[in-house]
Amino acid sequence: MATAIKQQSKVSEAEWAARQQLAACYRVFDMLGWSELIYNHITLRVPGEENAFLINPYGLHFSEVTASNLVKIDIEGNKLCDSPYPVNLAGFTQHSVFHRDLPDAHCIAHTHTTAGMAVSAIEGGLQPLNFYSCFLMGHIAYHDFEGITVRSEEGVRLVENLGDKRVMFLKNHGILVMGQTVPEAFMKHWLLQRACEIQLDILKTGVKPVVVPPEVVAVHQRDMSKVALPGGFGAPDFAAMVRLADRIDKGWRE
C-alpha cells in the first residue's frame, strides 16, 4: 500500500483514475484468458497530456499490473515517471505511432489470443458468419506481417493500412483494437475475440457455412443502438467485468 500512496501522491487525480482503469483492464483481460506470458500491451493516453501514455511494465504478467506500477512514457519512449521496469520496444513502436497520429485513439489493445492469431492467418480474415462478426464487418483493417514490430518505419504503414478503421488484424500476428475510452477498447476486443472463436468452431465442422448477406449485416449494425445501455459503448460490460475482477483480487487498485 505504501507504494500506491507514494505513486498516487505524485500524479494528478485524473492520471490516477486513468491508472486504475487501465490496471483494471489488464486484470480483466487476464481473467478472460487473453494474457500471453509477459507480452502484449494495453496503453492509455494520460488525460490532459497529449504526448504521454501509460503502458504495462515489461517483465510483469497482466495479473501483476497495478495502478502504481504502470509506466508513463512519452511518444519518443522516454520514461516520465520513476519506474524500475523497462518498456517493451515492440509495444512502444506499435502503440506510440497510433497515439501520436490518431487523436481519438486514447486506449489501444494488442493481443496474441489463439483465436485472434488463427483468424489473422486465414485468407479473407473475419467473415460475416455469426452474430458478433456481423457487428464488425466493414470496420476492420488488415496489415501484412513484417516480423516483430520494432522498426519505426513500419509505423507509417500501420497508420496507412488502418485508415479510418479502429480494429485491425495484424496478419499472421494478432489483433489490435482502439477506442476513445478503455471500456470501448475492451468491448471491441471482446466482440472481435468472440467472433474469431465462433468462426473457427464453424470452420471445424467442415460444412459450408451460411454467409450473412450485406443487406442483413447493415440492418444488424443499424439496430445495435436499440439494445445499448447508458454510459457509452462497452461501459456497463466493462464495469461488470471489473466487479468480477475485484472478487478475485483488488490489488490492481494500488
Image (cartoon, rainbow, N blue to C red):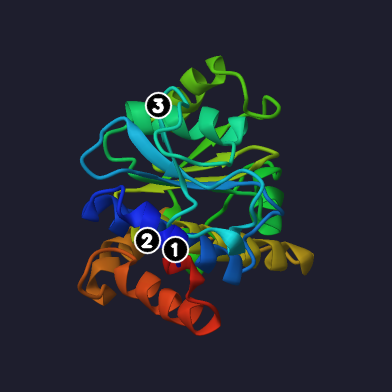
In the picture of the structure, the residue carrying the numbered disc 3 is: 75
How many residues crowd around disc 3 within 10 Å: few (fewer than 14), some, or many (20 or more)?
some
- The residue lying at 36 percent from left, 74 percent from top is 239
Q: What element carries label 2?
A: helix
- The residue lying at 56 percent from left, 46 percent from top is 57
Q: Quadrant location of the N terminus? A: bottom left
Residue 213, image x and y in percent?
46, 58
Q: What element carries label 3?
A: loop
2 or 3: mark nearer the eye: 2
Q: The disc labelled 1 sits on which kind of residue?
A: Ala
Q: Distance between the residues labelled 1 and 2?
A: 5 Å
In the picture of the structure, the residue carrying the numbered disc 2 is: 5
Q: Is residue 99 above or below residue 26?
A: above
How many residues crowd around disc 2 within 10 Å: few (fewer than 14), some, or many (20 or more)?
few
**Badge 3 vs badge 1, beta-carbon distance below 8 Å:** no
Q: Nearer the viewer, residue 54 or 103?
A: 54
In the picture of the structure, the residue carrying the numbered disc 1 is: 2
Q: Is mark 1 on a helix, strand or loop?
A: helix
Quadrant position of residue 154: top right
Q: Quadrant location of the C terminus? A: bottom left
Asked whether the viewer can see residue 97, the reply is: yes
How many residues crowd around disc 1 within 10 Å: few (fewer than 14), some, or many (20 or more)?
few
- The residue lying at 56 percent from left, 66 percent from top is 194
Residue 200, image x and y in percent?
70, 62
Left or right of 212, for residue 240? left
Q: Is residue 169 above or below residue 132?
A: above
Q: The disc labelled 3 sits on which kind of residue?
A: Ile
Quadrant position of residue 35: bottom right
